Image (tube, helix red, strand yellow):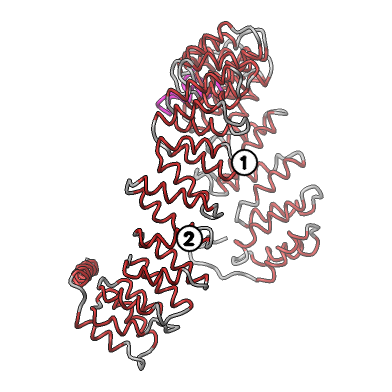
């Protein structure tokens, strides 16, 4: 707070000094520092300070430095910042003796200060042969901006390219002040010069400064063969205000070159308004693709039938029906679906309803999802994922159970998941699915429910009720139901069922046995890697799982899991796999992963021995090099808090 207060005091002091015309005592002190005997850095800082607190007493000393190669820039900035008219006089006088960059700097400062008394001298320099100083003088005169100052700049049009760019400054300033007629005169002169760097901004300025009267020039520019000029016109179209402008441009649309019309239509759409919508609808009737696209942004209720008529043959119409921002679109699209006879059109209408999330379409979509046409059924199920509500879950569950192929069942499951996730209380989202599992009349129906149930459990977490229901089903007399329940347990979001999955891996037959083993290993690996904070002895579970592996795929799985255990027991379990041809490289990689945590402990010798074996025999060059690197690095220093092995 003390530093902040000091800053505020300094700020107030500076403001007072500036308003008072400077600080005489401080100026004397700084002038003493400007003496040639002072260090260069000190003299530069003195100039910077004088820009803030200097009085007119500092002007002669600063003026004397304007030609200095090292300090001239600092001196000029100080003079430019000082409000005293003596600064103007000093800078004007310097024009007669400076040359090169110092002269250009003085010219720029006079332009920045708007010194009208400098106009004659600047006009003389502007007519000189030196291009750099002449260009700077033209820019300074344009910044001063009085009629006398602008006269030599206007006279230089067509002779010096800087003149055209310089005149844009006062022209823009005049337009900002509402002096449009004067601005138009300058913009038109610049346009007439055809100066490459100024033609585009001058054209834009000329159009905007004319207001509604700029439409003819705008249209003329839109007809230009120059793509850059047309781009400027399109920009100006979006900036020029007024509904009368919009109407005039709409009236010209069809008369413009065909290749320009889509871009002009897009600019009109950005302007908006009822006149534009009417014009767009007229073009949409003729099948214009750009117009059909535009209706997706600015369409109204009357636009929907036009899009529906174009829908059978136009993907653009379908996209616009999805996007069109009118509520009337929903019932109109739904009504069209009820009468559609063509399969392709019906599919598009269904997709539109789904993309718009039209809840009122759900009953019709449920009906179509039970129809005889497979393509329509799948389209309806895809849309139902967006339109359904929790109250529709019983019907969706029935659809899933009745599905005859896996692809259709997957779509039904997505719709079930979507509806369940719309239940406000996360803890209750599995309840309808659990009730359906208990009420299922056939094993196939019960088995099918575990897929969406598992998806919801993974999204919201496993509840005790959900776990109990799935566990009970792992003991079902039907093998298909058991397999579905085991798969659900294997994908559980936490490690709670890990031990139960291991038991199932001992008792079940294939493929359920493999599902249970993979699930147990996955859950234990999550604990070992720190992704799951469950209280579970991952080493014990993985050791038991290791005794059950029966294929190379399962060996790869268990070896990868051991790589997450930073314990010497995992090293010992991996050693036999170093001799197994199918998994030896993966086993060596797992050893390399856990070795750094063990090299500093009591088992360092055993770890080094295993690493030496890998470094000598492993066929994978990268793993071999990593093992050798660990050996070369030696045992790391044991860090505080490291777990004892």
Local SS, label 2: helix
Horizontal placement of 628 versus 454: left or right?
Answer: right
Q: Position of residue 179 (x, y in %)?
A: 33, 47
Mark 1 lies on a secondary structure that is: loop
Give the residue drawn at x 19%, y 71%. Answer: 13
Name the main secondary structure of what is drawn in magenta.
helix
Tell me the quadrant of the picture where the N terminus can be found: bottom left
- Residue 88 showing in the rendered view: yes
Front position in the image: 444 or 353: 353
Name the quadrant containing residue 497. Answer: top right
The percent coordinates of residue 121 (x first, y second) are 39, 72
The magenta span reads 414-435
- Picture coordinates of residue 355, whole percent (x, y): 53, 23
Q: Is residue 34 magenta?
A: no
Q: CA distance from mark 2 to mark 1?
A: 26 Å
Q: Is residue 478 above or below residue 552?
A: above
Asked if residue 218 is positioned above or below residue 58 in the image, the reply reads above
Which disc is residue 163 wearing?
A: 2
For residue 194, side relative to residue 140 (left or right): right
Depth check: give the residue in front, 603 or 195. Answer: 195
Residue 165 point in image, percent of width and height: 48, 57
**Residue 40, image quadrant:** bottom left
Which quarter shows the C terminus?
bottom right
Give the residue drawn at x 74%, y 64%.
625
Question: Residue 225: which numbered mark, if any?
Answer: 1
> Which residue is at the front of the view, 156 or 409?
156
Q: Is residue 143 left or right of residue 359?
A: left
């Amino acid at each position: 707070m003390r530093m902040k207060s000091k800053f505020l005091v300094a700020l107030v002091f500076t403001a007072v000094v500036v308003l008072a015309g400077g600080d005489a005592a401080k100026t004397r002190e700084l002038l003493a520092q400007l003496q040639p005997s002072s260090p260069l850095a000190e003299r530069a800082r003195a100039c910077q300070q004088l820009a803030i607190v200097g009085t007119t007493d500092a002007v002669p000393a600063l003026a004397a430095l304007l030609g200095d190669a090292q300090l001239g820039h600092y001196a000029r900035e100080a003079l430019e910042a000082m409000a005293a008219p003596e600064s103007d006089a000093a800078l004007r006088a310097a024009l007669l003796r400076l040359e090169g960059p110092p002269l250009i700097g003085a010219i720029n400062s006079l332009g920045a200060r708007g010194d009208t008394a400098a106009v004659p001298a600047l006009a003389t320099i502007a007519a000189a042969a030196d291009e750099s100083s002449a260009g700077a003088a033209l820019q300074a005169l344009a910044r001063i901006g009085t009629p006398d100052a602008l006269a030599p700049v206007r006279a230089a049009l067509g002779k010096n390219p800087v003149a055209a760019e310089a005149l844009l400054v006062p022209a823009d300033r005049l337009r900002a002040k509402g002096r449009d007629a004067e601005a138009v005169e300058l913009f038109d002169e610049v346009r007439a010069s055809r100066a490459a760097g100024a033609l585009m901004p001058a054209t834009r300025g000329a159009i905007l400064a004319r207001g509604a009267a700029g439409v003819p020039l705008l249209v003329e520019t839109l007809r230009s063969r120059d793509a850059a000029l047309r781009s400027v016109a399109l920009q100006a179209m979006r900036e020029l205000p007024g509904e009368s402008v919009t109407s005039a441009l709409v009236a010209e649309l069809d008369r413009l070159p065909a290749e320009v019309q889509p871009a002009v239509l897009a600019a009109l759409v950005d302007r908006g308004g009822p006149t534009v919508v009417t014009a767009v609808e007229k073009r949409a009737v003729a099948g214009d693709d750009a117009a059909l696209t535009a209706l997706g942004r600015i369409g109204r209720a009357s636009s929907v039938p036009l899009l529906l008529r174009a829908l059978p043959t136009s993907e653009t119409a379908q996209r616009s029906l999805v996007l069109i921002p009118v509520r009337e679109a929903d019932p109109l699209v739904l009504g069209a679906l009820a009468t559609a006879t063509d399969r392709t059109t019906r599919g598009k209408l269904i997709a539109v309803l789904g993309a718009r999330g039209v809840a009122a379409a759900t009953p019709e979509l449920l009906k179509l999802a039970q129809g005889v046409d497979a393509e329509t059924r799948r389209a309806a199920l895809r849309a139902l994922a967006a339109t359904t509500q929790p109250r529709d879950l019983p019907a969706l569950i029935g659809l899933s159970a009745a599905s005859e192929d896996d692809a259709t069942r997957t779509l039904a499951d997505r719709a079930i998941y979507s509806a369940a996730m719309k239940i406000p209380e996360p803890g209750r989202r599995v309840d309808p699915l659990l009730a359906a599992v208990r009420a299922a009349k056939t094993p196939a129906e019960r088995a099918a429910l575990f897929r969406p149930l598992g998806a919801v459990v993974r999204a919201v977490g496993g509840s005790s009720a959900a776990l109990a229901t799935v566990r009970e089903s792992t003991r079902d007399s039907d093998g298909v139901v058991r397999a579905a329940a085991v798969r659900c347990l294997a994908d559980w979001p936490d490690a709670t069922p890990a031990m139960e999955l291991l038991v199932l891996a001992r008792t079940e037959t294939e493929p359920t046995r493999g599902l249970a083993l993979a699930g147990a290993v996955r859950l234990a690996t999550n604990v070992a890697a720190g992704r799951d904070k469950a209280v579970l002895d991952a080493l014990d579970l993985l050791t038991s799982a290791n005794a059950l592996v029966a294929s190379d795929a399962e060996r790869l799985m268990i070896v990868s899991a051991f790589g997450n255990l930073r314990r010497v027991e995992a090293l010992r379990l991996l050693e036999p796999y170093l001799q197994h041809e199918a998994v030896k490289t993966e086993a060596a990689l797992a050893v390399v992963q856990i070795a750094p945590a063990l090299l500093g402990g009591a088992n360092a010798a055993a770890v080094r021995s295993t690493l030496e074996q890998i470094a000598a025999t492993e066929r994978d060059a990268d793993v071999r090099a990593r093992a050798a690197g660990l050996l070369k690095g030696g045992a790391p220093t044991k860090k505080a808090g490291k777990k004892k092995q």
